């Protein structure tokens, strides 16, 4: 199956600063990369995704970039706010997979 | 709509006991999933059901069984619980099988095995 590695495991930023979370994947055939956000004690929820036919996708303060050659993708959050504090998970499907393989998560803390 | 619901929310078991975690969705989704979440390990797929009547193993199926009771319900059974199965269990559903469809998660079940 797909091997997804995620860094860093924890990240603290000052409110208003940017945050970047990076993921690498092993299967070059993977073509879809979602990001899920999990607030403390809550369920994971999809916040943004990207397909391999584009290099970048933006949605207000969040963006995801993809480098297929290097097999890595990143989540960028600009102008961070305290409500951005959560655990973020990246994922990828792998060849022929009917499901997703998740990274180990990044705990983001935004300091007011 | 309630979305994806799970019962119970919390459970404590002794080693060797059995139990069934229940999951139901009211979104008319075809696919359903069971994950476990452990600190530093992320979300790992236990079993999934691409459609009613089918089930398949995920990354960590050992020690678990599943039943897709009907289109709405997908249960996870621990026949003989072990301390290594202490975890938070999430059920999820998606409109169609395959990785490209958003997965909607339930609130989770926190299981402790003593």
Image (cartoon, helix red, strand yellow):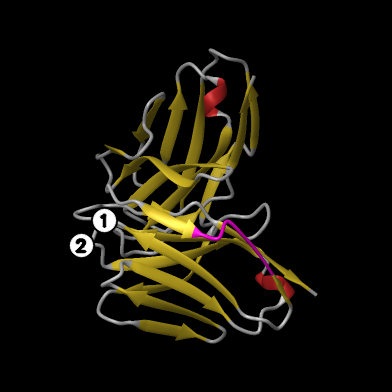
Res. B12 image quadrant: top right
In the displayed structure, A57 sits above or below A102; it is below
Q: From the viewer's side, name the closer residue of A62 and B94.
A: A62
User: Which residue: 47% across, 58% down?
Assistant: A6
The quadrant of the rendering that contains the C terminus of chain A is bottom right
**What secondary structure is the stretch in magenta mostly built from?**
strand
Label 1 chain ID:
A
Mark 1 touching mark 2, by CB under 8 A?
yes
User: Which residue: 25% across, 40% down?
Assistant: B54
User: Which residue: 50% across, 36% down?
Assistant: B22
Q: From the viewer's side, name the closer residue of B47 and A51.
A: A51
Residue A1 placement (x, y as % from top left) = 27, 47
- Can you identify the residue that label 1 sits on? A94
The residue range painted magenta reads: A7-12
Res. B62 image quadrant: top left
- Can you identify the residue that label 2 sits on? A29
Is residue A77 rendered magenta in the image?
A: no
Label 2: which secondary element? loop
């Amino acid at each position: 199956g797909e091997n997804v590695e995620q860094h860093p495991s924890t990240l603290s930023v000052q409110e208003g600063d940017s945050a970047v979370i990076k993921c690498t994947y092993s299967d070059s055939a993977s073509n879809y990369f979602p990001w899920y956000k999990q607030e403390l004690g809550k369920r994971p929820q999809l916040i943004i995704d990207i397909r391999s036919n584009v290099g970048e996708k933006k949605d207000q303060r969040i963006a995801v970039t993809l480098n297929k050659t290097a097999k890595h993708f990143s989540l960028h959050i600009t102008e961070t706010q305290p409500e951005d504090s959560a655990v973020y998970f990246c994922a990828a499907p792998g060849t022929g997979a009917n499901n997703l393989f998740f990274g180990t998560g990044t705990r983001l803390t935004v300091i007011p | 709509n309630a979305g994806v619901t799970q019962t119970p929310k919390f459970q404590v078991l002794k080693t060797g006991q059995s139990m069934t975690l229940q999951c139901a969705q009211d979104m008319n989704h075809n696919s359903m999933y069971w994950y476990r979440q452990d600190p530093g390990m992320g979300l790992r797929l236990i079993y999934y059901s691409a459609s009613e009547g089918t089930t398949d193993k995920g990354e960590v199926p050992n020690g678990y069984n599943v039943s897709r009771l009907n289109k709405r319900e997908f249960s996870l059974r621990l026949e003989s619980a072990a301390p290594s199965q202490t975890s938070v269990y999430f059920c999820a559903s998606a409109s169609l099988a395959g990785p490209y469809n958003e997965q909607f998660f339930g609130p989770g079940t926190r299981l402790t095995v003593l």
